[in-house]
Image (cartoon, grey):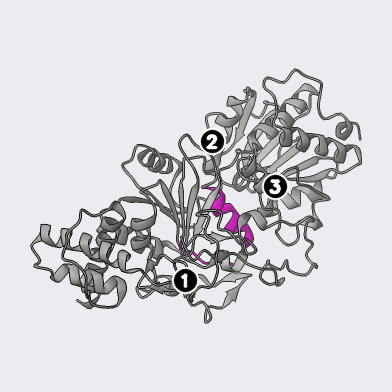
């Protein structure tokens, strides 16, 4: 087909493409020449999906071809239009009810799949389907009814069952770990402070039942609850919290507020303007983050530096999309901190290790996770608590090399520092802690009672043979002491 062989016209590039973007377009051209008219480009978060899509659009315009770009939700329409205008594409129309940019005569149309399902489909030569792994019925029906139309899918996670029944070829020009190594994506550190018991939660449609999951994750007895861990570990970074459902999200938001942490709330019913306000408030520091229910997994370009996974999942697609929100680089951002309260990394591994070379058909066997395939999973560093690659002898975060260690100990929600040898705190550690506890105790006039309680809570013993020498506390100690106060007040509230 002439259209497939001559999609792009020769043109001067306004700015150079990155190597993986150029490779993506080369591989796409090759697939079209081979006769493929249903091609999926797998592009990790931060790979420059908009840049690549803009090149496809410009090539289509240069050849006089009409193109429709579909987005998975109405809330992404204006964001997509603005992104394409930033790439120099202005001949745009929008297919959405009462939108001021509605203009069916424009050669490029941006449409939400929700609106398309209620309209006559536009006449077009090319359809670019964003987030094609979502497999919207209106798109698959369109593909079936229009064999002469070229369809190009874009997705970071094209692993949905049945995609091979509609798409012919998968192109993966670059993987996430390559983008991190090149400095295009942010590196990340993972802590897994909680280990919820999901043994009794049934599986529905390949993932955990939401109702039972909410009951488990909302239990106040969960080790290392979200609030206390965030206070100790997050460094007050801009944060996205992923909750199970609306009730669970509101519960987390209230608990954070009681700890003097203001976070916004977002679910599928939060409109575009309110979302923009939430991100603006977070950007200027009025909000520490946003607690959301599965809706901020795509279309988030904000500066996110901490991800809290409070929603267990068996879905690798949901897992990768969620973590990806925190991997965009930003000025002064050394890494993204991931606090996994859901054991997702123990179940699925690191997001950089999840990869499949082929699309899946309806009759194909379900994809097995790394753990189900019997592959080694990430392990917790005994020195700093970060999850490290399973075969790494030396922790990439702190440089600690494990030798003989005691069992991992997690007590009352605290990530306990592991040390060489038998894993026990030294006399010097205990004296330093006791001295700082005495300093805070003296400031509050507790006559040693508070210091003793803090010490016993930390070491599970009373202070013995330690000098009564108050010492100014470190920021880490103050964060720990603050978290203990929060835990105390929560216990009182629960008992009331």
Residue that label 2 marks:
79
Residue drawn at the location 65% of the way across and 63% of the way down: 391
In the rendered image, which residue does mark 3 sit on?
A: 175
Distance from disc 1 to disc 2, alpha carbons, whole Å, reads: 54 Å
Q: Position of residue 20 (x, y in %)?
A: 73, 37
How busy is the neighbourhood of tag 3: few (under 14 within 10 Å), some, or many (20 plus)?
Answer: some
The residue beneath circle 1 is 421
Q: Which is more foreground, mark 2 or mark 3?
A: 3
For the residue pair 194 and 419, the one nearer the viewer reads as 419
Answer yes or no: do the residues labelled 1 and 3 have beta carbons within 8 Å? no
Q: In the image, 12: left or right of 473?
A: right
Query: Is 24 drawn above or below residue 188 in the view shown?
Result: above
Q: Is residue 217 above or below residue 159?
A: below
Q: Is residue 327 above or below residue 379?
A: above
Q: Residue at x 14, y 62 (%)?
A: 441
Question: Which of the image's four quarters has the C terminus?
Answer: bottom left
Where residue 419 appears, as percent x and y from the top left, is: 44, 66
């Amino acid at each position: 087909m002439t259209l497939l062989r001559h999609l792009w016209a020769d043109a001067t590039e306004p700015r150079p493409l990155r190597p993986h973007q150029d490779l993506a377009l080369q591989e796409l051209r090759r697939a079209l020449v081979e006769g493929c008219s249903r091609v999926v480009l797998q592009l990790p978060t931060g790979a420059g999906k908009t840049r690549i899509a803009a090149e496809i659009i410009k090539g289509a315009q240069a050849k006089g071809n009409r193109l429709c770009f579909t987005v998975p939700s109405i809330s992404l329409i204006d964001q997509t239009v603005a992104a394409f205008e930033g790439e120099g594409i202005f001949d745009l129309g929008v297919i959405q009810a009462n939108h001021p940019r509605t203009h069916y005569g424009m050669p490029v149309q941006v449409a939400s799949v929700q609106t398309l399902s209620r309209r006559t489909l536009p006449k077009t030569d090319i359809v670019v389907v964003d987030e094609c792994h979502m497999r919207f019925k209106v798109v698959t029906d369109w593909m079936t009814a229009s064999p002469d139309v070229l369809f190009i899918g874009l997705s970071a996670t094209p692993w949905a069952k049945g995609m091979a029944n509609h798409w012919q070829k998968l192109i993966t020009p670059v993987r996430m770990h390559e983008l991190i190594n090149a400095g295009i994506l942010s590196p990340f550190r993972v802590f897994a402070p909680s280990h919820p018991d999901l043994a009794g939660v049934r599986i529905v449609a390949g993932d955990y039942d939401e109702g039972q999951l909410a009951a488990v994750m909302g239990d106040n007895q969960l080790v290392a609850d979200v609030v206390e861990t965030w206070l100790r570990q997050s460094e007050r970074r801009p944060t996205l919290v992923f909750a199970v459902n609306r009730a669970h999200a509101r519960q987390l938001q209230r608990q954070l507020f009681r700890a003097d942490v203001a976070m916004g709330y977002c679910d599928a019913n939060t409109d575009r303007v309110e979302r923009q306000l939430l991100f603006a408030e977070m950007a200027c520091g009025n909000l520490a983050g946003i607690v959301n229910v599965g809706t901020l997994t795509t279309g988030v370009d904000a500066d996110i530096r901490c991800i809290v996974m409070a929603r267990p999942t068996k879905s690798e697609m949901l897992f990768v999309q969620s973590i990806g929100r925190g991997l965009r680089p930003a000025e002064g951002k050394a890494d993204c901190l991931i606090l996994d309260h859901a054991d997702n990394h123990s179940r699925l591994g690191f997001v950089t290790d999840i990869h499949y070379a082929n699309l899946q058909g309806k009759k194909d066997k379900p994809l097995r996770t790394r753990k189900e395939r019997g592959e080694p999973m990430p392990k917790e560093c005994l020195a700093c608590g970060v999850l490290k690659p399973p075969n790494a002898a030396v922790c990439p975060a702190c440089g600690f090399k494990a030798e003989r260690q005691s069992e991992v100990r997690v007590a009352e929600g605290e990530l306990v520092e592991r040390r060489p040898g038998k894993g026990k705190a030294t006399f010097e550690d205990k004296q330093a802690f006791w001295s700082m506890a005495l300093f805070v105790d003296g400031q509050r006039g507790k006559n040693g009672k508070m210091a003793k309680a803090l010490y016993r809570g930390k070491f599970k013993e009373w202070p013995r043979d330690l000098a009564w020498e108050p010492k100014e506390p470190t920021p880490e100690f103050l964060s720990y002491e603050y978290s203990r106060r929060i835990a105390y007040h929560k216990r009182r509230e629960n008992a009331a």
